[in-house]
Image (spheres, rainbow, N blue to C red):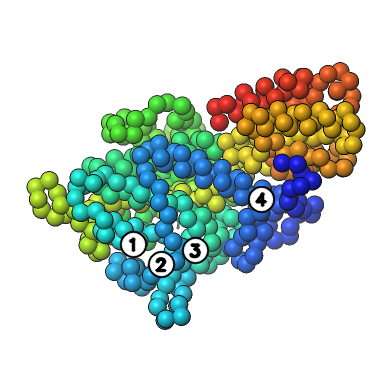
Amino acid sequence: MRLTRYFLPVLKENPADAQIVSHRFMLRAGMIKQQAAGIYSWLPLGLRVLRRIEAIVNEEQERAGHIPLLMPTLQPADLWRESGRYGDYGEEMLRIKDRQGRDLLYGPTNEEMITDIFRAHVTSYKDLPLTLYHIQWKFRDEMRPRFGVMRGREFLMKDGYNFDIDRAAALHAYNRHMVSYLRSYERMGLTAIPMRAASGPIGGDNTHEFLVLAATGESEVFFDSAVTELKLGARDVDYDDRTQVAKICEEFTTLYARTDETHDAALFDAIPEERRKVARGIEVGQIFYFGTKYSDSMGATVVTPDGSKAPVEMGSHGIGVSRLLGAIIEASHDDKGIIWPEGVTPFPVGIVNLKQGDAGTDAACEGLYKALAAKGLEALYDDRDERAGAKFATMDLIGLPWRITVGPRGLANGVVEVTSRRTGVSEEMTAEAAVAKIVAIYEGV
Ligand code: ATP
Ligand code: MG
């Protein structure tokens, strides 16, 4: 993408109403525009990151054997009357009447609708296990929408639902979700710690939240610092292997890590003092096992091997896709702007032409741009007629992890400069070597 042809409305001034750094940088970098309290347009740069996060979530869900579908944002109220939640959900639910006077709602979550789909089509244990998920906009009329996309009213969520024959199979589905979530967050450059949580309006007794540590997080968390060292890494996971998947979950949930709702002071005090941490965290996902709560009330039964009928065992599992942008920025930035991890960056690399209009630098930049494109990497080429300082400031603000700087002086020596946004370290090398370096960085991403 050539910057002169792009739509990147960066702001010079700090927006007055943005209280936390991620909100401030998302506005300044021209990623989002607020349209109403907690409701945002996704401008091109923001949309690119959102799509990257969605892609990672999709890949990891499909790797775990979970199947995508797409349910609508608007739901008939009658489904929620069946489960009893229409009355219970309260003011967070946006209720709508259509021209026929029928009650609709903008879905805050989809347990009822997915149960309705299941009961319409699945009747036998032979069709299980089954996990269906979608990535869809939700609406919750939050009392205090704030912090930009972190606590929106309209927000994008991945929500998945497992259907299983018995408790053991449903707990395996729960564990599959935990492992696939850990892998997703790691690919986004995040450490998200599974913490034992309380269940709230979804119901159920087995539940973990995934928290990214950040001073601006809304949850108070208590943990053993050793838990932050755990990494899933590139290990091979066979998602059908119940023992292996359960072992990984055990590895990640044995050390003490809880939110304030489930905190147990006595257990916490048993941790060696130097590892006892109280901090704040951002909830970027949650998994629940809730058994037959919805299948009972909505009549979702299957024929079991012995010929009897039983309500299907279920769980639901969510990732805050749009909230993740805020969480990643809170975890990865400096004074000058965002520092995107390679896994989610809107563009893999930026090209800065220090002397736009100079035949030599223009040609070198075009050459780099095309060579990267030939390798499947779309650079953001700053081809504006601007001072070098302004170009660097824009690149630093929008946070591309790598920058290639091209100027007449370097070209005279046959080199360009490759700079890491994270470390600030620059290296001179030929244009070919620069392309090879960037290609190698993104090979495993
Ligand atoms: P919170 O406690 O932050 O209100 P929640 O526990 O009500 O969230 P869940 O029902 O667990 O939310 O939804 C799954 C995920 O969706 C959450 O882990 C969070 O990452 C995201 N999410 C929930 N509410 C919002 C919101 N208002 N804006 C953006 N993301 C949200
Ligand atoms: Mg939650």
Of tags 4 and 1, the one toward the viewer is 4
Report the Cα–Cα distance between label 4 and label 3. 22 Å
Ligand 1 within 8 angstroms of badge 2 C-beta: no
Dot 4: element: helix
Of the numbered discs 2 and 4, the one sitting upstream in the chain is 4
Of tags 1 and 2, the one toward the viewer is 2
The residue indicated by pointer 2 is: 75
The residue indicated by pointer 1 is: 112
How would you rate the neighbour count of disc 1 (Cα within 10 Å): few for under 14, some for 14-19, many for 20 or more?
A: many
Q: Residue at x 59, y 63 (%)?
A: 39
The circle on residue 139 is 3
Of the numbered discs 3 and 1, the one sitting upstream in the chain is 1
Residue 183 in view of the camera: yes
- Left or right: 12, with 168 as reference point: right
Tell me if label 1 and label 2 are in contact, CB under 8 Å: yes
At label 1, the amino acid type is: Glu
Report the Cα–Cα distance between label 2 and label 3. 11 Å
Tell me if label 3 and label 1 are in contact, CB under 8 Å: no
Image quadrant assignment for residue 119: bottom left
x%, y% of residue 311?
20, 56
Q: Residue at x 46, y 27 (%)?
A: 234
